[in-house]
Amino acid sequence: MNPAKALGPAILTFIAYIVFSGSVSGYDLITGAAIAAVTGVLVSDFLVTDTRKSLDIRRLGWLIAYAFYYLTVAELKSHLSFAPKVLSGRIRPGVVAVRTPLKTEYGMVTLANSITNTPGTATVDIDPEKQVLYVHWLWVGAEDEEEIREKIAKPFERFIKHIFEGGEQA
Amino acid sequence: MIEDITAIAAWAGLALFVGGAVWDLIAAIGMNRLPDFLSRLHAATIGVIGGAFYPLIGISLILLGTDIMGEYRYIAAGSAALTAFLVLLLAPAGSHALARAARKKGLYRKDILVIDQQEGGETE
């Protein structure tokens, strides 16, 4: 067992505990720390493959930047553009293949989740070996491979690449 | 100064909360109007993000910006914020499972798809 490996999940658990309990009294801090330590040790083998990456502060910065961009700009844009289509029922649906350069499991899952969570695009299947996501698109705006990638995945990939990809330990 | 910030937070939260009702209405109308399972999934997404995630964040902001619940407001605000992020992470997992199952079993209208780039997406 590696204490540094457990640190990432433990910090997350501690934050979740403090936010959920809504108090910073001594009792909550001590209980939270104890629970976080146990949880961190228990789950670290499943969640963490690269300790150095899990504690990298620059990746956290990119994650925060991504969350901010995604939750404000990306969501608002797709909500506003697809609400009229959903209301009128005038749609042009299709299943398109989106090729992605992302290789890690975390990266692909984050991309698939981001695509599904914006109205108008939903991931229906994933091929990890070919690095292709199959996306159901409510209004097919492009049929060319590059153009599809540009419209669906590019804005997210830029951030996800910095959060999860690269810097593998040799 | 502090009062200004809390007032802004409360009003922003109220806007998100009321906006959530509108998005939920749009999602419900879309659910009825759209023709097949996979396209209804997009209406459901509007209901999850615009109609559940943002209102929960809004509730959190309202509670932090006012003192309607006394000292319990931090507990409620924290729970609402954490619930919002759990919804954000878990809702797409459910969507993926449903979409993949519908796709495999062909429970959608193939005739309205203008393009289908997945070969052998359907097994039956």
Image (spheres, coloured by chain):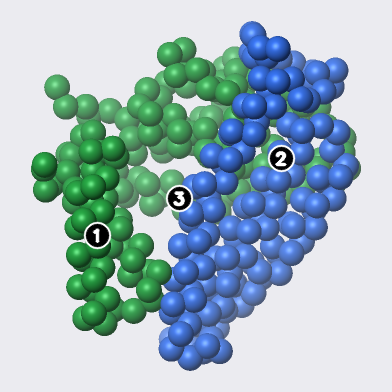
Chain colours: A green, B blue
Viewer can see residue A155:
no
Q: Give the quarter of the figure containing the N terminus of chain A.
A: top left
Disc 2/disc 3 C-alpha distance (Å): 21 Å
Going by the numbered disc 1, the residue's amino acid type is: Ala
Residue type, mark 2 in image: His
Check residue A36 in the rendering and tell me which mark sits there, or answer none. Answer: 1
| Host chain of mark 1 | A
**Contact (CB < 8 A) between labels 3 and 1?**
no
Left or right: A166, with B17 as reference point: left
- Callout 2 touching callout 3 (CB < 8 Å): no
Q: Position of residue A169 (x, y in %)?
A: 16, 27
Q: Residue A77: x and y, percent?
A: 65, 46
Dot 3 or dot 1, earlier in sequence: 1
Q: Where is residue A89 in the image (x, y as percent from the top left)?
A: 87, 39
Q: Is B57 in front, or is A166?
A: B57
* Residue identifier under label 2: B42
Q: What's the residue at 60%, 61% (across, down)?
A: B54
Say which amino acid is labelled 3: Ala
Where is residue A142? Give x, y as percent: 69, 21
Disc 2: CA contacts within 10 A as few (<14), some (14-19) or many (>=20): many
Please indicate, yes or no, whether residue A97 appears anywhere in the rendered image.
yes
Label ID, residue A67:
3
From this view, report whether residue A51 is shown above or below residue B14: above
Q: Is mark 1 on a helix, strand or loop?
A: helix
